[in-house]
Image: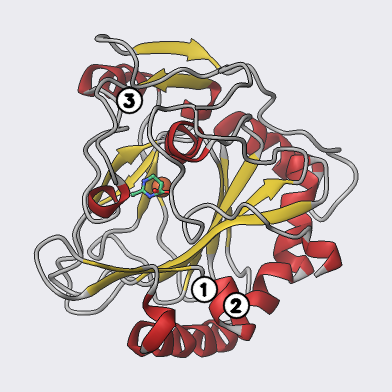
Amino acid sequence: MSTSTDLYPSRQGTKWEMKPRLDPPVWGDPDHGPLARERFESFARDGYLFVDSAVSPKEAAALLEEAHRLADEAGPAREGVIREPESQDVRSVFRVHLKSRLFAELAADPRLADVARQLLGSEVMIHQSRINYKPPFAGKEFYWHSDFETWHVEDGMPRMRAVSLSLNLTESNRHNGPLMVIPGSHHVFVSCVGQTPEEHYKRSLRRQEIGTPDAEALSELMAQRDIASFEGGPGSAVFFECNLLHASNCNLSATPRTNLFLVYNSVENELTDPYGDQPARPEFLAERAAQPLGQG
Ligand code: 6CS
Ligand code: FE
């Protein structure tokens, strides 16, 4: 267990709690970086930013092809390949920025990394990367959660100083299980009830049940702000704060909803031992020797 002070205890009590976050929602300079002040401030307020065209549709098509190649790859590359809960379809492939040059270059691309640098106010490193394939019919939901809650309890991320990028490689629309968020929910930390089981990730990556907020807490937050969901073509993207509550439905359409998920963490927010009582998860989920991107 981590020996540093636990600013965000979770999975310890018998009742959920909602407390104000202790870290600022943004750490950088609104007037220094690719985001205009207004966009920077809207991220601070709402916890997310939608980007119409983070990469071109042509680039997204090449990335999608690479994503398929990674799902089919054999051998050691199979580490970090997760199946759907009710079928053998590939649900996620982790560590794509270390398995593929194309994804490595994309993660370091200033169009993306400079936004993360501005929001986090420091140099950045990749904490986690994955493709979520969400295949037609078999692609199941991701229940409501804060990524930070898991990364804090299970991986030892000390502070809320990370930002995720969800980049659409296919179209994302109302029928195929687009990303949904509760705007502004990153301002509070909702502690969860329930003990972390051994090797929890083997289950949670297929269907998460522990480390999810109580329905009462969700209802309270949803009474304050309507859910926002994001539809966009290949190449569109959402940056969202590591503590923003988010989810997505299953895919009941006939085509996949595939996206790339990249987590930028501040180099000043290095992982410690987990704050929960289980051993640290494998590194394909939480990089412990990540290099600052600028020096890659
Ligand atoms: O485990 C993780 O790191 C991520 N995956 C899931 C299903 N929940 C928490 C976090 O987003
Ligand atoms: Fe998540």
Neighbourhood count class around disc 3 (C-alpha, 10 Å): few under 14, some 14–19, many 20 upward: some
- Residue depicted at 37% across the width and 72% down the height: 258
Disc 1 versus disc 3: nearer the observer: 1
x and y percentages locating residue 143 in the rendered image: 26, 43
Disc 1 target residue: 96
Task: Tell me which amino acid carries mark 3.
Answer: Met
The answer, for residue 129, to whether it is visible in the render is yes
Q: CA distance from mark 2 to mark 3?
A: 35 Å
Q: Secondary structure at mark 3?
A: helix
CA neighbours of label 1 inside 10 A, class few (<14), some (14 to 19), many (20+): many
Is mark 1 in CB contact (under 8 Å) with mark 2?
yes
- What is the quadrant of residue 85 in the picture? bottom left
Element under label 1?
helix
Task: Name the residue: 26% across, 9% down.
Answer: 15
Q: Residue at x 63, y 16 (%)?
A: 22
Residue ID at (81%, 56%): 34
Q: Nearer the viewer, residue 28 or 48?
A: 28
* For residue 211, above or below residue 135: above
Camera sees residue 35? no
Which of the image's four quarters has the C terminus? bottom right
| SS at circle 2 | helix
Above or below, comparing residue 198 to residue 195 in the picture:
below
- Judging by the rendered image, the residue that carries numbered circle 3 is 222
Percent x, y of residue 51: 60, 59
Question: Residue 227 versus residue 279: which sits nearer the camera?
Answer: 279
Q: Amino acid at mark 2?
A: Phe
Ligand 1 neighbours mark 2 (CB distance < 8 Å): no
| Lower position in the chain sequence, tag 1 or tag 2 | 1
